[in-house]
Image: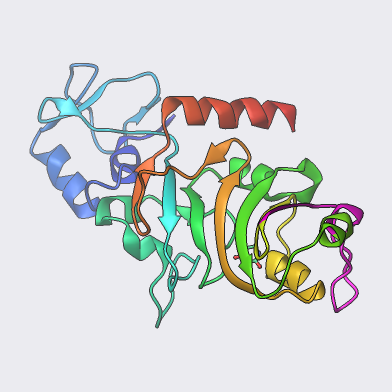
């Protein structure tokens, strides 16, 4: 049960002041009746909340797939640089969304934005072995020996040992890399360790989510029902 004014603010459509006004002007109904006041406690999953006769659009959690472009920080805010949150409209910026894991500033590709902290934790914990798939282009010639080294677990320059990972060679200088953890600059450092520095990196998939081919860099969309179900199904198994 939550306060009605909090529920309306959480939609991101109105500021707190605007919510107060909506209620004062009698433009809100809960299950067909005028609410008793802004502090009225209701279950937003069970009640129909209308504003001017249309659904208030409350959702417990928001899940967005963003095609992160290069040059943007995977952060919620930054005093100087553009962040992934700056790519969203104001209404969505007010929902407390954050990126699930970080992509480097120059890395492109799939980034999940949500306000569901539990899901984020499960997707990111290395204990849960969620696959993240990257397309990498490198300076150098990839060889079968690199695949074997990835499968055995690369030891980085600072002595950190990576979990076994998969390297699938696509061409002399291109590969798909699948890792289950998210150490700082991990894919770049793994390939650098093999003497093949990354020139371009793009995340294609994370768990059951695949980057939508129809999303150009900088664009986002809500997850489909099917994608949300797949995430939920994955959560049950990890
Ligand atoms: N590994 C990297 O090196 N960079 C990223 O952005 C993601 C994974």
Image quadrant occupied by the C terminus: top right
Magenta-drawn stretch, dominant element (helix, strand or loop): loop
Q: Residue 99: horizontal and vertical position, in percent?
A: 51, 56
- Residue drawn at x 8%, y 38% is 25
* Residue sitting nearer the eye, 85 or 208: 208
Q: Is residue 204 magenta?
A: no
Report the image quarter containing ligand 1.
bottom right
- Residue drawn at x 34%, y 65% is 86
- Residue drawn at x 16%, y 24% is 34
Instruction: Please determine whether, in this image, residue 237 is positioned above or below residue 104.
Output: above
* Residue sitting nearer the eye, 176 or 39: 176
Q: Residue 208: horizontal and vertical position, in percent?
A: 59, 35
| Left or right of residue 209, residue 167 in this image | right
- Residue drawn at x 27%, y 33% is 57
The answer to which image quadrant residue 203 occupies is bottom right
Instruction: Report the magenta residues as a range.
Output: 150-170
Q: Residue 58: horizontal and vertical position, in percent?
A: 32, 33
Q: Is residue 165 magenta?
A: yes
Instruction: Please determine whether, in this image, residue 42 is positioned above or below residue 88.
Output: above
| Left or right of residue 6, residue 169 in this image | right
* Residue sitting nearer the eye, 229 or 96: 229
Image quadrant occupied by the N terminus: top left
């Amino acid at each position: 049960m939550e306060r009605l004014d909090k529920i309306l603010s959480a939609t991101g459509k109105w500021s707190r002041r605007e919510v107060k006004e909506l209620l004062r002007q009698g433009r809100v109904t809960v299950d067909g009746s005028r609410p008793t006041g802004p502090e009225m406690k209701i279950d937003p999953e069970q009640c129909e909340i209308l504003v001017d006769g249309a659904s208030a659009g409350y959702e417990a959690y928001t899940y967005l797939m963003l095609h992160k472009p290069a040059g943007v920080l995977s952060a919620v805010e930054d005093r100087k640089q553009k962040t992934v949150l700056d790519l969203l409209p104001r209404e969505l910026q007010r929902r407390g969304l954050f990126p699930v894991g970080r992509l480097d500033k120059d890395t492109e590709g799939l980034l999940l934005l949500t306000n569901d902290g539990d899901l984020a934790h499960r997707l990111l914990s290395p204990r849960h072995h969620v696959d993240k798939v990257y397309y990498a282009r490198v300076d150098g010639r990839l060889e079968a020996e690199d695949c074997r080294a990835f499968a055995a677990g690369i030891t980085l320059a600072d002595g950190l040992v990576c979990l076994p990972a998969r390297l699938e060679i696509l061409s002399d200088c291109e590969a798909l890399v699948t890792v289950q953890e998210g150490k700082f600059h991990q894919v770049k450092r793994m390939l650098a360790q093999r003497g093949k520095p990354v020139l371009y990196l793009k995340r294609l998939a994370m768990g059951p989510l695949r980057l939508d081919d129809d999303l150009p860099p900088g664009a986002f969309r809500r997850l489909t029902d099917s994608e949300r179900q797949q995430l939920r199904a994955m959560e049950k198994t990890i």
